Amino acid sequence: MPSSPPTALVTGASRGLGLETARQLAARGFHVLAARRDALAGQAAAARIGAGVAQGEPWALDVTAASSIAALAERLGREGVRLDVLVNNAGISLKGFDAEVVHRTLAVNFFGAIAVTDALLTSLQDGGAIVMVSSGMGELSAFAPALRARFLDAHLTRAALIDLVSSFERAVSGGRHVAEGWPSSAYRVSKAGLNAWVRLLARELAPRRIRVNAVCPGWVRTDMGGDAAPRPVEVGAASIVWAATHDDGGGQPTGGFFRDGRAISW
């Protein structure tokens, strides 16, 4: 009997990197669930992904809304969907820098990815893969040494990481983030936090053989990256797909940070 195709869920899949990642996974034989906040945009995107994308009712997801995340998780369970791959691609990069920009950016790029992953873990197969779409902008060289040490602490807990990232928002609100050694970029901090969570989650999920990795797709020509970006979206998405599908016979990496299939510095 032929085996069923593997299933991947990609967040933020209505355009850009998410759409191209979904398209490439579908081309590799995956059954792709393209989750997106805008259902109408998602329907248009589905037609561009091609064979392999899940048809029917859109897979709606707002990563900042607990009710939306819960509804997606409930639907996966109700329909008996088992995921082999979860790609947390949904993300934003806002202009300006103030407490509101920080709050909105962290809500999507950091807290949203955590909430989605936690909610979908029961639907993820043992031996599966989680890919966090990160950025080289999250490299810790932009942070004060004391903050770098806290992010890289091998014994960092979930509670400590959440408090650390939240302390950035508090520092910005209080006008003291520069004095505390934070960069003046909500996007940088959101990705540094996401990278730290990748290392933490990889340890948590090791007993289930679930690989958890961060990927920097590079500066890509998308609505977010802009027309001046040097990389086509196809190349950026290929890095994500590599992390989602890489299998070298049992020695698959986990808890790492990659670009173009090669490890890069935190």
Image (cartoon, helix red, strand yellow):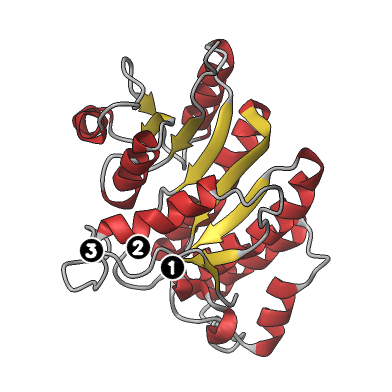
The answer to whether residue 143 is above or below residue 43 is below
What x and y, as percent, mark residue 248? 62, 52
Q: Is residue 257 visible?
A: yes
According to the image, label 2 marks what residue? 93
What x and y, as percent, mark residue 69? 51, 31
- Image depth: mark 2 or mark 3 in front: 3
Choose top left, top right, bottom left or bottom right for residue 26. Answer: top left
Mark pair 2, 3: CA separation = 14 Å
Is label 2 in contact with label 3 (beta carbons under 8 Å)? no
Give the SS element for disc 2.
Answer: loop
Amino acid carrying label 3: it is Arg
Amino acid carrying label 2: it is Ser
Frontmost residue, 229 versus 250:
250
Q: Residue at x 51, y 19 (%)?
A: 4
Indicate which disc, 1 or 3, sits on the residue closer to the N terminus. Answer: 1
According to the image, label 3 marks what residue? 221
According to the image, label 1 marks what residue? 187
Amino acid carrying label 1: it is Tyr
What x and y, as percent, mark residue 1? 55, 10
The answer to whether residue 241 is above or below residue 171 is above
Frontmost residue, 171 versus 201:
201
Indicate which disc, 2 or 1, sits on the residue closer to the N terminus. Answer: 2
Residue reaching furthest to the left? 227
